[in-house]
Amino acid sequence: MIAGSQGFILFLLRLVAALPEVELRVPGGCNVRTADMTAEPTLGRLEVRFAVHRERLRLAAMLDELAPEEWDQQSLCPGWRVRDVVAHTVLGPQTTIGELMIEFARARGDVHRMSLDTARRRAEAPTAILVAELRAAADSDRRVPFTTARDPLAGILVHTQDIAIPLHRTLPMPVVDAAVAAAGMWQNPFYATRRRVRGLRLAATDVTWVRGEGGLVQGPIEAILLALAGRPAGLRRLTGPGVAILAERLDGPCRP
């Protein structure tokens, strides 16, 4: 069943990719898709779903290549092994509201402790099982309770880099996906993104994406998304007078 649904989704992805670029409108004159390359890119709900599907499968393919010892290496986030981050990624589509409330109470209201504890317990599973569950999650439209439709996209993009960068693997983010994920992260108060970059102007150099006012920080949208997520790993790819300020604010442990 999983293999069949994956094949159908991949067929739809190829079909969408083959469509000519056109401008569509919904009642009220709002553009849904446009050929204007100067506009900030957007994705519809189904396109976000396809992007999450693709990126989960890309991560699973990379994990297939890991040596056993690499699973126990530290990720970008201190205290989180590679296997812990994979387990955390797998748990997202599986967690119910009831389970979330139980784990929240068990962690005494500490969201970060809850995330790490649940990930470590799940990470005890064999790595082959974790990869299989990640592939199964590619076909799932479920997400962590109380999160938005764009959160799984930000999650898989950032967590893939949490794993790939310390293992010296290269798995670049698609720029449109990263721009949409960054826009969602900017709007979501849970991430505390605006507090982290207050007084700074962030501008992507590879896609139309600008936020904030103040000292300029510019560079690839992938590096900006990592900074928004509290990861200093992309700072070396950013330039501008605001980078030093941003570096000071990211001088601390990140959390998945």
Image (spheres, rainbow, N blue to C red):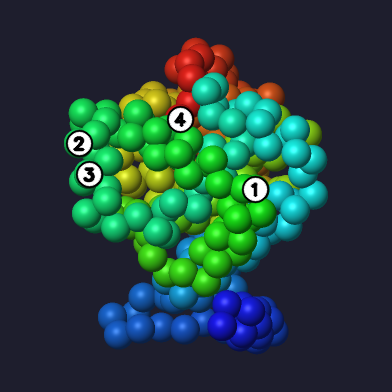
The answer to which of marks 3 and 1 sits earlier in the sequence is 3
Name the residue that disc number 3 marks: 102
**Callout 4: helix, strand or loop?**
loop
Q: Amino acid at mark 1?
A: Thr
Q: Amino acid at mark 3?
A: Ile
In three-dimensional space, the C-alpha distance between marks 2 and 4, rounded to whole angstroms, equals: 19 Å
In three-dimensional space, the C-alpha distance between marks 4 and 3, rounded to whole angstroms, equals: 21 Å
Name the mark nearer the viewer: 2 or 4.
Answer: 2
Q: Which mark is residue 236?
A: none
Q: Are marks 3 and 2 in contact (CB under 8 Å)?
A: yes
Number of residue marks: 4
Name the residue that disc number 4 marks: 255
Q: Quadrant of the N terminus?
A: bottom right
Residue 11 visible here: yes
Q: Amino acid at mark 4?
A: Arg
- Between 4 and 178, the one lying in front of the other is 4
Residue 44 visible here: no
Name the residue that disc number 2 marks: 105
Residue at 64% x, 48% y is 127
Name the residue that disc number 1 marks: 127
Name the mark nearer the viewer: 1 or 4.
Answer: 1
Residue at 24% x, 38% y is 104
**Callout 2: helix, strand or loop?**
helix
The answer to which of marks 2 and 4 sits earlier in the sequence is 2
Q: Amino acid at mark 2?
A: Ala
**Callout 3: helix, strand or loop?**
helix
The answer to which of marks 4 and 3 sits earlier in the sequence is 3
Q: Is residue 79 above or below residue 97?
A: above
Residue at 52% x, 82% y is 23
Residues packed near mark 2 inside 10 Å, few (<14), some (14 to 19) or many (20 plus): few
